[in-house]
Amino acid sequence: MKVPLPRLLDGSVLQLYPPAVPRDFCAPQWFCAHLEPLKELLAAYAGVGAGVICAPTGGADPLSLEAKGLFDQMEAFNRSLMEAAVEAAGKTGLAAGVLESTGLGHWEEIPFGRRVDSYAQQALCLKEAGAVLLVIRKMTWLPEARAAVLGARQTELPILVAMEPCDSRLPMEEEAVLAALVVLQELGVEGFGLEGNAPPAVMEPILQRLEGLAKVPLIAKPAAAYSDEMGRATLLSPGAFAAMAQGLIQSGAVLLGGGVGSTPEHIRALSSPSAGAAGSHDRQPAPLVLAGEKGVYYLDEDFTFSQPLTCHLDMSEAVLEAEDCGCDALLVRVSTAADGIMLGENGYLFRMPICLLADSAEALESALFHTTGRLMVDRRSDLPGEELDRIAAGYGALVR
């Protein structure tokens, strides 16, 4: 199912939080204990024209709930909140389940596959409760966003992703946002963009850069309440919010909604400009566009490889030496599934595009699954062409 465009998204539900949020606060648990005001707010967003109503299920994934001692409430939380969104969306809107960053540190201590499984469990639960699409939000790091997408894909529902590049706790550089677009659109998401605590004016230049690479509709959910560089609090009126949103439309945004501080009145004010949003998502970038965790790489057809690197627990010296050889892409041989895991664990070291030379289908699948980025696969790999193409296509990898 394709998300109809143009489509107005909803706004924030943070105004329902308690005045003083305790350290052990669990948002899904709070919303489930306050379902009536939540239903009223979601219905208000639907009433002012929001076509996508998001259930506030962020943080209701197994890993997050396990960390709070609430794992046994996963199905109940997701079902109750998703049913509230379905009710508010009615027959004309789209009810979306939400996956968010777990906020759990020590990424390396939780295997990537387990993170994917955690998001998959939640996504499947949301689908069963009535979600017709999934929204991945509050992501400040591509590896975690990618885990969420890989998990969410198991539902076969449409997926929208909104990164949060201006989070004060973990700022995400523009180059990393561009890399996230390249990687995630090749994994099949149907919309990509920005959300969070940044006002419209801050999002505009990032959207302008995203537009040149986007194959999918761009999303913008800017903040209506934010602090400037001097720490001064600003609250945009609905009219000012809508006026500033015109710049987002001109920068390529097709799906509009509200971030921190937004209310139904802010979404109502967006109704008119969003109706005229132009879809710039049909643009097809140049084919040889690859990406790593923190950047995008552009290759000409006559690019050159390094000598093949082998996978080890610590590849730092080998990667540095290969990057100094004057090549355009690093060729990495993967012979086993364990090689793919080791490559993924060393992926942050690479500052050049990666091309895989695989000795088996198992090795290729493992490398593409565990390694963050849009990779290339060498046609000389030791597996049948049709199988190579199928595996590569599943991760949006280029084959050359």
Image (cartoon, helix red, strand yellow):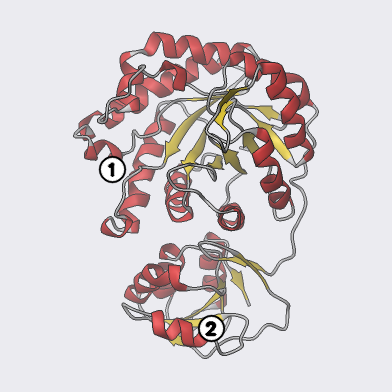
In the picture shown, does residue 175 fall above or below 55? below
Q: Relative to residue 116, is residue 284 drawn left or right?
A: right
| Amino acid type, callout 2 | Glu
Q: Observer-nearest residue: 400 or 142?
A: 142
In the picture shown, does residue 301 fall above or below 188? below
| Residue identifier under label 1 | 63
Residue lying at the far left in this picture: please name it.
Answer: 69
- How far apart marks 2 and 1 lie (CA) works out to 37 Å
Q: Which mark is residue 323?
A: 2
Asked if the residue under mark 1 is in contact with the one under mark 2, i.e. CB atoms within 8 Å, the reply is no
Q: Tag 1's secondary structure?
A: helix
Locate residue 290, reporting x and y percent: 61, 67
Task: Kindly indicate the quadrant of the structure image that contains residue 212.
Answer: bottom right
Q: Relative to residue 57, is residue 294 drawn left or right?
A: right
In the picture shown, does residue 144 fall above or below 266? below
Would residue 266 be visible to someone looking at this image?
Answer: yes
Residue lying at the far front in this picture: please name it.
Answer: 230
Task: Kindly indicate the quadrant of the structure image that contains residue 207.
Answer: top right
User: In what quadrant of the picture does the N terminus appear?
Assistant: top right
Which residue corresponds to the image point at 52% horizontal and 51% vertical from the top-left? 172
Would residue 49 be visible to someone looking at this image?
Answer: no
Locate residue 165, reporting x and y percent: 54, 45
| Amino acid type, callout 1 | Leu
Q: Tag 2's secondary structure?
A: helix
Locate residue 369, reporting x and y percent: 43, 63
Which residue corresponds to the image point at 69% horizontal and 42% vertical from the top-left? 217
Q: Local crowd at mark 2 within 10 Å, few (<14), some, or many (≥20)?
A: some
Which residue corresponds to the image point at 35% horizontal and 42% vertical from the top-left? 102
